[in-house]
Image (tube, rainbow, N blue to C red):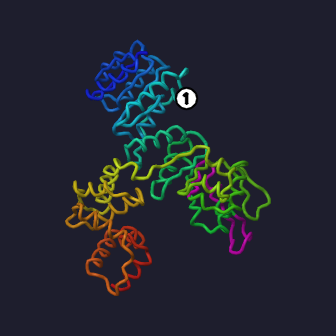
Amino acid sequence: MRLLVVEDDPSVRDTLTTFLELEGYQVDAVASTLEALERLKDGGYPIVISDWYLDEKTGLDVLTAARGSNPSCSVILMSGRGTIENVMAATRSGAFDYIAKPFELDTMLDLVRRAEAAAMPSSDDDDRDDEQLPVTEMIGFSPPMVDVYKTIARVADTDATVLIQGETGTGKELVARQLHNKSKRCQQPFVPVDCAAIAPSLLESELFGALKGSYTGADRDRVGALESAHGGTVFLDEIGDIDSVFQMRLLRFLQEREVRPVGASRAKKVDVRVVAATNRDLSKLVDEGKFRSDLYFRLNAIPLNLPPLRERRGDVEHLAREFVKRYNGRYGLSSELTKSGLRALQEYSWPGNVRQLQHLIERLTILAPQGRIDEAAVMEALSATTRHEVQSESLAETEMEQIRKVLAATGGNKSRAAKILGIERKTLYRKLERM
């Protein structure tokens, strides 16, 4: 089988060509989009492997040309800077797959063999425009994140229920919002519900609504989250924390797509997509009899697992630099992340994942001495976040100065200041009373 490899990096091009030739493929390799487009005119390649970032054109142009001359051509795109916009554009234009660099040669071989075995092309997206996609808040070019982008790209336009699983701080709500924003429901409401933050006795009225007088304190009709999200998406966060009684109510809703407010005699149909998330192992809860298996299977129609930050360390630099830029702009500062500071960030395990990194960078941007986020500043900040609450009778002058700086930067917002300082809000209030 003839393959075309389009890659401007000679070492990658030569390595990939040699490897595939040893596996029995006939490989033509070119270094530019101009050469590639010329080769693709006759439609003679069933498989094309192309880098995304090439010259004045991109791998998307190669993909368009390859599919234009041969609709059954399977195009595999590679990139060392994979973004959700790139993955979405590639998927919508009919790419066979998208792979992040660096990759194992055996992984590429597996993709090529799957492309070779594909009897019919996937043309679901042939007629879509390659529109300019909006900038996203999702940051990361690592292979695990590219896999997340690929899943979002494939399922966003469907109404399938998605279950996002990942540790605290990995960005589950952000992924849910991306699923909504990239879908045909994007102009309709996105309604998040934190199931763990609502008392079990109130969760039913929160989701399904309630009529005036249906329970003590119900002084007016209340529209539930599911009805509020009609036409759009409801995001049920921490779904693993709901009790067994409400699990049954939720299962019935997923089966019938009807809501009956508390105190109402009749149900009403709602059109809503459900995206759920949890930091718990639902399959284990099912085994332990704490979560209904039928509800789990309903929710888990499309599983999406978010990697912890320690498994995507290559993204720490991109995240940290983006957060420094963001908070410099927000607070009118010019803090700088040094090489030693970045190295310290990359070596940390990040038990709180991206959320912990973000809060730490916000704190450092405001408090780092002379605006230099170096190794010493990072290590001191990490030590402070893991330290137990200070129990001394009086506050040290340095701590008082830090609190003043953070409060000034946040415009006196005590909740925000407490997050930046890594302490509970009630702890901050106690410290302020002593100042």
In this view, the residue farthest toward the bottom is 393
Q: Is disc 1 placed on a helix, strand or loop?
A: loop
Q: Specify whether 298 is left or right of 266.
A: left
Residue pictured at 36% horizontal, 72% vertical: 387
- 43 or 214, which lies in front? 43
For label 1, the residue is 124
Classified by dominant secondary structure, the portion drawn in magenta counts as loop
Of residues 145 and 258, which is closer to you in this image?
145
- 367 or 214, nearer to the observer: 367
Q: Is residue 181 above or below residue 279?
A: above
Task: Point out the stretch of residues depicted in magenta.
Answer: 210-237
- Give the class, few, some or many, for how many residues have Cα within 10 Å of label 1's Cα (few <14, many ≥20): few
Q: Position of residue 396 (x, y in %)?
A: 28, 81
Up the image or down, 79 lies above or below 409; here it is: above
Question: Where in the figure is residue 431, as x and y percent of width and height?
Answer: 37, 81
Rendered residue at 47%/39% (across/down): 150
List x then y, in percent, for residue 352. 42, 60
Question: Is residue 218 highlighted in magenta?
Answer: yes
- Residue type indicated by callout 1: Asp
Q: Can residue 111 be found in the magenta stretch?
A: no
Residue located 44% across and 17% down the image: 69
Q: Is residue 428 left or right of residue 305?
A: left
**Quadrant location of the N terminus?**
top left
Which of the image's four quarters has the C terminus? bottom left
When asked about the image quadrant of residue 330, the answer is: bottom left
Q: x and y percent of residue 192 in the render?
A: 55, 57
Depth check: 202 or 74 in front? 74
- How many numbered callouts? 1
Q: Residue furthest left?
A: 370
